[in-house]
Image (cartoon, rainbow, N blue to C red):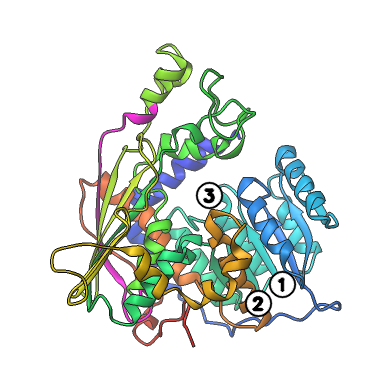
């Protein structure tokens, strides 16, 4: 879109230069916290659902939400004919009535929120729209709002999510599906039962070769060798918008897949919190090489100065004394990995090796294969809903996540992953940009709970 470059430049400046002032400004304007907004049941008893953004990510959400017998998709909104046509096919295959469609300007979602009544609105749009749409939905009176990851790009945006949720009483959930991955939930159970001892260190990240996602030919979601390289207008999927972030920003742009599970393991915002962060980035080479290799040295994109370092490394310290290393790499040739390592005083889980070591139970200095341990400590949510999740996206974790959210809606309970999680996890992006821009300087991490973390108790995926 014509304003994308200007927006991204503003985003980068806010992340790199205005973070500290954002902390002070938000703290000075702490809102009065409203009681949780309760939903009023619909006449037919079904949960009224709205969607803002109907692209590839939403298709899986449609599949899961439409499988719940007590839901009704009231309205959807998108500016793209391509996305809406995909959605129409999804509803047709499911044998479901097509909801009301809002399409037009980039702000048509505001009309949808004004005209319709929802119990929950799910947002799966380009990153720069996550906060404006979430804030608008909460202010429109929607009791539950689910926003895709990352939830926010700047410090001001992080505070906007927290402040608006507190002011309105609307529950905001960050839709971080990796928190619901089967092995992640099993290791969470193991950690809570003390198998690893006292936790000391975690590693995580997002290491995913997205070169062929940031460019395509406007027909296929991923780039097909030999076809035309496109991004922005004329492309489809994430190549329409995500590539511009790689041009204008240098930081960990997508931290939540890794840090979400770590946040749950370490009880962040619930008896623990992040206190310091520092980041550094390698030089940027991967995207330029991809353009030259596939489009030639004279391709127009070969002159682009991509700011995003190929590998961004972030170190975080918690108030309880744990350390975390977060890695971001979407520009290099490599297999997919989230690089999890969960280390305690009595053992560790190492995801990339599918290995576990528990002192006193594993053979000394020898890895155990993780499968038997993970099966033994399989989480209750997977035991209960695993069969229904088998054919759902991302190995079933999308289904488990949506089930957990909709159970909270049915019972008028707080969401499993709330506005404070959304803000703390997403803030890594803006802080890492600022740290890198200032030579890897260590930065203080804001307390988005304003002190409530001290008395808040673990809430996510508790087992009875």
Magenta-highlighted residues: 267-287
Residue contact at pointers 2 and 1, CB within 8 angstroms:
yes
**274 in magenta:** yes
Which numbered disc flags the more N-terminal residue, 2 or 1? 1
Q: Is residue 46 left or right of residue 182?
A: right
Image x and y of residue 57, in percent: 60, 50
Mark 2 is surrounded, within 10 Å at the Cα level, by few (under 14), some (14 to 19) or many (20 or more) other residues, namely many
Secondary element at image label 2:
helix
Q: Residue 119 carries which label?
A: 1
Residue 311 at x, y = what percent?
A: 29, 41
Q: Which numbered dot is residue 283? A: none
Tell me which numbered mark, 3 or 1, is placed earlier along the sequence: 1
Q: Quadrant of the N terminus?
A: top right
First in sequence, mark 2 or 3: give its number: 3
- Of 276 and 409, the residue lying toward us: 409
The structure residue drawn at horizontal position 25% and vertical position 38%, both measured from the top left corner, is 282
- Residue 343 makes an appearance in the image: no
Q: Where is residue 262 in the image (x, y as percent from the top left)?
A: 35, 66
Q: Count residues near mark 3 (Cα–Cα under 10 Å), then give few for <14, some for 14-19, many for 20+.
A: some
Marking on residue 127? 3
The answer to whether residue 3 is above or below residue 161 is above
Quadrant of the rendered image containing residue 375:
bottom left
| Residue labelled with disc 2 | 409
Q: Which of 289 and 403 is in front in this view?
A: 403
Mark closer to the observer (2, 1)? 2
């Amino acid at each position: 879109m014509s304003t994308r470059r200007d927006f991204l430049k503003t985003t980068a400046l806010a992340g790199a230069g205005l973070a500290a002032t954002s902390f002070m400004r938000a703290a000075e304007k702490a809102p009065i916290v409203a009681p949780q907004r309760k939903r009023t049941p619909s006449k037919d008893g079904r949960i009224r659902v709205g969607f803002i953004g109907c692209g590839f990510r939403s298709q899986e959400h449609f599949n899961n939400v439409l499988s719940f017998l007590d839901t009704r998709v009231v309205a959807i909104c998108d500016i793209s004919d391509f996305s809406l046509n995909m959605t129409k096919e999804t509803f047709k295959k499911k044998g479901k009535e097509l909801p009301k469609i809002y399409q037009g300007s980039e702000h048509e979602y505001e009309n949808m929120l004004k005209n319709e009544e929802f119990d929950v609105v799910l947002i799966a749009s380009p990153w720069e729209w996550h906060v404006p749409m979430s804030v608008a939905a909460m202010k429109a009176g929607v009791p539950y709002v689910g926003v895709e990851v990352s939830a926010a790009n700047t410090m001001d945006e992080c505070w906007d999510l927290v402040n608006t949720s507190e002011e309105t009483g609307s529950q905001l959930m960050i839709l971080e599906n990796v928190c619901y991955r089967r092995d992640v939930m099993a290791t969470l159970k193991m950690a809570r039962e003390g198998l690893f001892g006292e936790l000391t260190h975690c590693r995580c990240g997002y290491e995913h070769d997205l070169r062929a996602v940031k460019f395509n030919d406007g027909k296929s979601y991923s780039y097909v060798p030999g076809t035309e390289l496109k991004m922005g207008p004329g492309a489809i999927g994430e190549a329409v918008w995500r590539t511009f972030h790689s041009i204008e920003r240098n930081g960990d742009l997508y931290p939540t897949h890794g840090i979400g599970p770590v946040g749950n393991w370490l009880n962040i915002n619930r008896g623990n919190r992040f206190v310091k962060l520092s980041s550094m980035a390698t030089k940027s080479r991967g995207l330029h090489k991809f353009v030259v290799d596939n489009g030639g040295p004279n391709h127009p994109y070969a002159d682009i100065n991509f700011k995003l370092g190929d590998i961004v490394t972030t170190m975080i310290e918690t108030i309880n004394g744990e350390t975390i290393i977060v890695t971001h790499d979407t520009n290099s040739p490599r297999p997919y990995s989230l690089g999890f390592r969960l280390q305690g005083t009595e053992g560790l889980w190492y995801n990339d090796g599918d290995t576990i070591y528990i002192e006193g139970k594993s053979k000394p200095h020898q890895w155990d294969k993780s499968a038997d341990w993970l099966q033994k400590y399989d989480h209750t949510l997977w035991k209960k809903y695993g069969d229904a999740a088998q054919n759902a996206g991302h190995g079933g974790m999308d289904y488990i996540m949506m089930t957990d959210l909709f159970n909270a809606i049915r019972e008028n309970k707080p969401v499993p992953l709330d506005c404070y999680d959304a803000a703390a996890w997403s803030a890594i992006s803006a802080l890492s940009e600022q740290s890198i821009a200032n030579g890897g300087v260590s930065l203080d991490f804001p307390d988005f709970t304003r002190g409530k973390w001290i008395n808040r108790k673990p809430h996510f995926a508790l087992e009875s």
